[in-house]
Amino acid sequence: MNPVLLKIIVLVGILLVVLGLASGLIWLERRLLALWQDRYGPNRVGPFGLLQVMADMIKIFFKEDWIPPFADKWVFVFAPSIVMITVLLTFAIIPFTSVIQITDMNVGILFFLGMSSLGVYSVVLGGWASNNKYSLLGGMRAASQMLSYEVFMGLSLMGTVMLAGSFSLRAIVEAQQHMWFVIPQFLGFVLFFIAGVAETRRLPFDLPEAESELVAGFHSEYSGMKFGMFFVGEYLGVILISALISVLFFGGWLGPVLPPVVWIILKTLFFICFFILLRAALPRPRFDQLMSWGWKWMLPLTLANLAVTGAVVVAMRR
Amino acid sequence: MNLWPFVLYAALVLITAGSMIGLSAILGERHKERFTNQPYEGGILSEGTARARFSIKFYMMAMFFVVFDLESVFLYSWAVAARDLGWVGYWEALIFIGVLVAALVYLWRLGALDWSPDTRRKTR
């Protein structure tokens, strides 16, 4: 087939599948949470409640799209789209298979880290522009939480970078032909996963929007699709972190018998379900515990991991 | 590296985000009642503005982020070339990590990483 046409099909396909999966996750999460809490969950609209997503989408588009008169209008309107744009752009570098990838950047991991840092602006600006005290506190919490965990999120990936000798995600997958990086980099995997949960502001680290203390945190004043974009952005983040974990630590599309696409989907879905299980199983820490946990445990552990991995990589080189 | 697929993809992403905002602005209902234009603070009338002072801890975290993230960028460039740099590069990186840890220990002893003032007094 014409390579240009193929690329365009891949590119549109990735966008549609990722957006579809993000809205589908709303249904999946509610069903799974219900299962673990002995309830039914949404089961009225369509078979197994599958059409709930469509119903929610139609509803949310016709909801009042309120811009508070006391808010900073332009920033208020623009803020929710930042998180969606940065997360969606990151999907461009993920090698779903050797064919299904939009662009193979040689600085792939750096691009991901840069985009996830930019994503912080979304919640901070959203919280600040709302001109509501709860929103402001939520936005500030989100900022300091995401910034703190950003530091060792990058460092925890450097072990895999050392083993593969490249920032390119494709090269990292190809370096895992013989052994998944989760085996030599188990600590790195755990640290990255915890940082990923904090980065996507998912439970147990959802303190920026802790509804029992801050109403809804940074999106208290948001309604309609602008609220929906924060929501979808969060689910996109979950998919992104899950896909990245599969690519960086679990061999990406590599696997026996089944075709590569099936492997990457299975691995990603597994980690998405694990994200949801975390929400069902763990209580929220206090905010000061969250911050001191990050700086006093995670950062030193990441640096130790880096020092040990570096020594092993240098000693084993040919 | 071929850049045009990324540019096309970025354009599609921008169009998607823009049309989501635009569509809901056109389709959404509008209403106006007595308290519609009040900030929501759990049903209580709002007092003062949200441009208020808040804890300096949030600012400190941003400062630490700048300090540590900037330094970790140097470690990124070492990580990608660790194999070629060999032991010389490794010891240099280790000294650099040592400096980072020293800064962390200093902040820790200072009590800058604790949120509640009580624990800060204890460590002094």
Image (spheres, coloured by chain):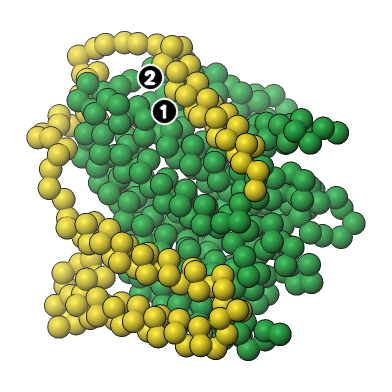
Q: For mark 2, does the 10 Å Cα neighbourhood hold few (<14), some (14 to 19), or many (20 or more) residues?
A: many
Judge left or right: residue B26 versus residue A316: left
Q: Which residue is mark 2?
A: A65
3D distance between C-alphas at marks 2 and 1 = 7 Å
Q: Chain B: what color?
A: yellow
Q: Amino acid at mark 2?
A: Asp
Disc tally is 2
**Of callouts 2 and 1, the N-terminal one:** 2
Judge whether residue A40 can be spotted in this image: no
Q: For mark 1, does the 10 Å Cα neighbourhood hold few (<14), some (14 to 19), or many (20 or more) residues?
A: many
The residue furthest left is B48
Q: Secondary structure at mark 2?
A: loop
Residue at (22% x, 71% y) in the render: B112
**Picture coordinates of residue A295 (x, y %)?**
35, 70
Q: Which chain is green?
A: A
Q: Quadrant of residue A223?
A: top left
Q: Please state, as top left, top right, bottom left or bottom right, where the C terminus of chain B lies in the image.
A: bottom left
Please give the label number shown on residue A226: 1
Is the residue at mark 2 from the same chain as the one at mark 1?
yes
